[in-house]
Image (cartoon, helix red, strand yellow):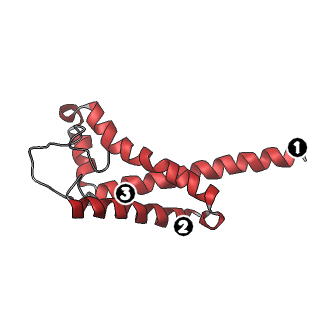
Amino acid sequence: MLFFAESMGRTFTERTYHYNLVPFKEIKRFLVHWESLGTMAVMLNLFGNVAAFVPYGLILPIMYRRLRSLGRITLWTFEFSLLVEVLQLVSKVGSFDVDDLLLNTLGGILGYLGFVILDWIRRKRDGKTS
């Protein structure tokens, strides 16, 4: 989806390649023009970018003990998202959007918060059974 959005109907195929370097520009556009763009397009862009990176923030601290901090997960998620966006920019497939960086990083943070909650529940449960 990240690289083939045009062929899946996420963006216009008739336009030339574009990128967005202005924070919140596309997020605002999607919120302001929600009705004309359609709920599916808005949900796919805003919530899809967040949801796509939730597993990243949830699984990394499970796999790597040293990534069990909000700061590290935020940095790793941002870096991975930046890599994806730069690949889109260089290959001119998909589109580079700074808002995607923000939304993807938010997804990683939410995933990490999910990890923290699940880990707290696990530790609480294990402490009661001991």
Q: Secondary structure at mark 3?
A: helix
Q: CA distance from mark 2 to mark 3?
A: 16 Å
Question: Is residue 130 rendered to the left or right of residue 84?
Answer: right
Judge whether 88 appears above or below 36 on screen: below
Label 2 vs 1, first from the N-terminus: 2
- The percent coordinates of residue 18 (x first, y second) are 15, 56
**SS at circle 1:** helix
**Three-letter amino acid code of the residue under disc 1:** Thr
Identified at 29% across, 32% down, the residue is 40
* Label 1 environment density (alpha carbons within 10 Å; few <14, some 14–19, many ≥20): few
For residue 26, the mark is: none
Dots 1 and 3: beta carbons under 8 Å?
A: no
* Residue at 30% in and 55% down: 99
Would you name the residue on which mark 2 appears?
Answer: 72
> Which x, y percent locates residue 92?
19, 58
Q: Look at mark 1 in the image and give the residue it sits on.
A: 129
Q: For numbered disc 2, what is the local secondary structure? A: helix
> Which image quadrant for residue 65?
bottom right
Q: Which quarter of the figure has residue 22? A: bottom left
The image shows residue 62 at horizontal and vertical percentages of 63, 55
Q: Position of residue 81 (x, y in %)?
A: 38, 59
1 or 3: tag closer to the N-terminus: 3
Q: Is residue 23 left or right of residue 48?
A: left
Residue 65 is left or right of residue 31, and the answer is right
Of labels 2 and 3, earlier in sequence is 2
At horizontal 48% and vertical 54% (from top left) the residue drawn is 108
Amino acid on which disc 3 is placed:
Leu
* Residue 21 seen: no
Q: Residue at x 25, y 48 (%)?
A: 28
Mark 1 and mark 3: span between their CA atoms? 41 Å
| Residue marked by disc 3 | 102
